[in-house]
Image (cartoon, helix red, strand yellow):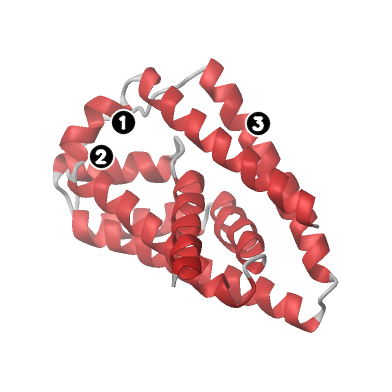
Amino acid sequence: MNTALITLAAGFGTGLSLIVAIGAQNAFVLRQGIHRDAVLPVVAICALSDAALIALGVAGVGALVVAWPAALTAVALLGGAFLVVYGVLAARRVLRPGALRLEPGSTGSRRRAVLTCLALTWLNPHVYLDTVFLLGSVAAERGPLRWTFGLGAAAASLCWFAALGFGARLLSRFLSRPSAWRVLDGLVAATMLALGATLIARA
């Protein structure tokens, strides 16, 4: 039980580290929340899409490792290298912090919000790298508990997007300050560098 909880927490922390970054998707969800426009479907699309992609990553990378055990070493090295790069980029942002800028605009139709959210989610190549490859490679290291790790990552996505969407009016002030992103990016950098180094060391 303790091992499963630790794995779940590791998945949550890793997933959150990859999701928390300044980007078009986060800005869109926050903007929808501020305007209280189609918040529930937007949050649901983001969270469910991430869950589906994480499942693909866990299943795909896991199946590859089962079929070809030697692939675990290659996956660990590649995943570790990507995580280290992500960590370095996050560390650079600590020195040059940005802020989440929201483009002004009025509320629109629910259909338009849904289509925009789908496009920002499924047409973003970084989403596939984060969820399918990176989370899949880290989950593969967990062996039989890889699905528990994936569940934790999916839960992180749900919590983050729900907080952005439904807590938008409170979070907008916080996330508009560069100092806030300096703290977040510092945590992300530490997590990514530690995970990347661990994957490479175990390979």
**Which quarter shows the N terminus?**
bottom left
Q: Nearer the viewer, residue 73 or 25?
A: 73
The residue under label 2 is 31
- The answer for how far apart the CA atoms under marks 1 and 3 are is 28 Å
Q: Position of residue 195 (x, y in %)?
A: 63, 47
**Label ID, residue 49:** none
Classify mark 3: helix, strand or loop: helix
Q: Secondary structure at mark 1?
A: loop
- The answer to whether the residue labelled 2 contacts the one labelled 1, judged by CB atoms less than 8 Å apart, is yes
Residue 88 is tagged as 3
C-alpha distance separating marks 3 and 2: 29 Å
Front one among 59 and 187: 187
Q: Please give the name of the residue rendered at 28% of the width and 57% of the height, measured from the top-left corner.
A: 42
Q: Is residue 79 above or below residue 145?
A: above
Furthest-bottom residue in this view: 67
Q: Residues within 10 Å of mark 3 (few under 14, many from 20)?
A: some
In this rendering, does residue 62 appear at all?
Answer: yes
Q: Earlier in the sequence, mark 1 or mark 3?
A: 3
Residue located beneath label 1 in the image: 103
